[in-house]
Image (cartoon, rainbow, N blue to C red):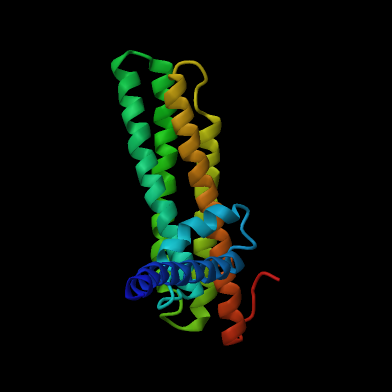
Amino acid sequence: MAQNILFFLVLFFPIFGFSNVVESLSRERVYLESQCRSALYRDLCVRTLLPYVNKNTVPSPQRLAQISLASCLSKARVTKTYVDMVAKKLNETDKLQEYQALEECIHQIDNGVDQITQSFKELQRMGTDEDENFAWHESNVQSWVSAALTDITTCIDGIPGNGIGRREKAMINARFLNMKQLASNSLMMFTRYTTRYRAARGIKNPYP
């Protein structure tokens, strides 16, 4: 009888603990799905933010926007490193036309990285100074992230067709697409944050 009780306890508690974890993850996912419902890429939005949410920590809308933008910046830097490597390989094999196309693309990535970096720094300043500066910070972030999106799109469109290996081109396209999706989601999360901040502080929207 004692062995049966022990067996029951050993079996029951791991299942009970697992159910608590599943329930916690479910609550976190439901919360993030509500935050990401306006995103064009909802699943990506949830996956990006989920590691930073737990039952003890519910990030503010500003923090969620910062995490989203930081993830986009990280992806942009990794993508630039990969494109640099492919461009160097093309230069070494005397594929001048393809190298020049990627060189222009690298320039656009550099611009995009700078713009997202500036946006992240500007977002960190928001809410720390007077509310009359809020619209100015907001305009800067929106302009820079939108410009980064344009640079990413231009870079994708300018990738040469035949000179780059099929695998390398597929990898570059996939990375740029992911960057574009992260930037789009970041812009949505930022707009969500600014809308809620305005409502809480009674700040008029200068862009009706």
Q: Is residue 20 above or below residue 93?
A: below
Residue in the foreground of this view, choosing between 190 and 148: 190
Residue in the foreground of this view, choosing between 146 and 73: 73
Number of numbered discs overlaid on the protein picture: 0
Is 108 displayed left or right of 26 in the figure? left
Q: Residue furthest top?
A: 94
Give the percent coordinates (x, y) of residue 62. 48, 72
Give the quadrant of residue 42. Answer: bottom right
Q: Is residue 67 above or below residue 163?
A: below
Give the percent coordinates (x, y) of residue 1. 36, 75
Q: Residue furthest left?
A: 92
Q: Residue furthest front?
A: 1
Is 20 displayed left or right of 41 in the figure? left
Q: Is residue 143 visible?
A: no
Image quadrant holding the C terminus, namely bottom right
Residue in the foreground of this view, choosing between 149 and 172: 172
Q: Residue furthest right?
A: 208
Give the percent coordinates (x, y) of residue 125. 40, 73
* Residue depicted at x 43% and y 67%: 15
* Residue depicted at x 50% and y 82%: 131
Is 102 displayed left or right of 85 in the figure? right
Give the percent coordinates (x, y) of residue 23. 51, 70
Q: Is residue 200 above or below residue 34?
A: below
Q: Is residue 2 visible?
A: yes
Give the quadrant of residue 94. Answer: top left
* Residue depicted at x 31% and y 14%: 93
